[in-house]
C-alpha cells in the first residue's frame, strides 16, 4: 500500500517495488518461543524458514496462534 499511497502507478509496479526488505529469517530448528519473540520485537506478521539457503516455508503469526489454540483450551497471553 505504501507505493500506492506515494502516488505510484499501480500498473507499473514490480515485486521489487512492493516487497518487504527487512525479512526475518529462522531455521527449522528455531524454538517456537524465539519465533514469538521475533513477532513481538520486530513487529512483523511473517517469518521465513530457511535451511541451507533454501526457503522451506513461512510462519505467519496466525499459524502460531492456531497451533497454540489447537494444543490447549487456554487463550494465548499477549495476543
Image (cartoon, rainbow, N blue to C red):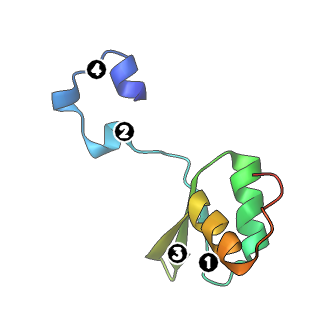
Disc on res. 17: none
Answer yes or no: do the residues labelled 3 and 1 have beta carbons within 8 Å?
A: yes
Look at the numbered disc 4 and give the secondary structure of its residue.
Answer: loop
Callout 2: SS: helix
Q: Which mark is residue 18?
A: 2
Mark closer to the chain start, 4 or 3 = 4
Q: Residues within 10 Å of mark 4 (few under 14, many from 20)?
A: few
Q: Could you give the CA–CA distance between mark 3 and mark 1, rounded to whole angstroms?
A: 5 Å
Name the N-terminal-most of marks 3 and 2: 2
Disc 2 from disc 4: Cα separation: 11 Å
Q: Earlier in the sequence, mark 2 or mark 1?
A: 2
Circle on res. 50: 3
Q: Quick one: label 2 or label 4, which is nearer the N terminus? A: 4
Q: Residue furthest front?
A: 73
Residue at the spot of label 1: 27
Q: Height in image: 34 above or below 10?
A: below
Looking at the picture, how far across and down is residue 25, in whole percent? 59, 65
Numbered badge on residue 8:
4
Amino acid at each position: 500500500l505504501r507505493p500506492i499511497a506515494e502516488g505510484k502507478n499501480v500498473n507499473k509496479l514490480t515485486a521489487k517495488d512492493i516487497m518487504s526488505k527487512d525479512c526475518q529469517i529462522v531455521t527449522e530448528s528455531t524454538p517456537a518461543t524465539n519465533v514469538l519473540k521475533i513477532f513481538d520485537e520486530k513487529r512483523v506478521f511473517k517469518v521465513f524458514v530457511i535451511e541451507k539457503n533454501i526457503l522451506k516455508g513461512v510462519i505467519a503469526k496466525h499459524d502460531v496462534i492456531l497451533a497454540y489454540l489447537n494444543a490447549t483450551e487456554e487463550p494465548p497471553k499477549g495476543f
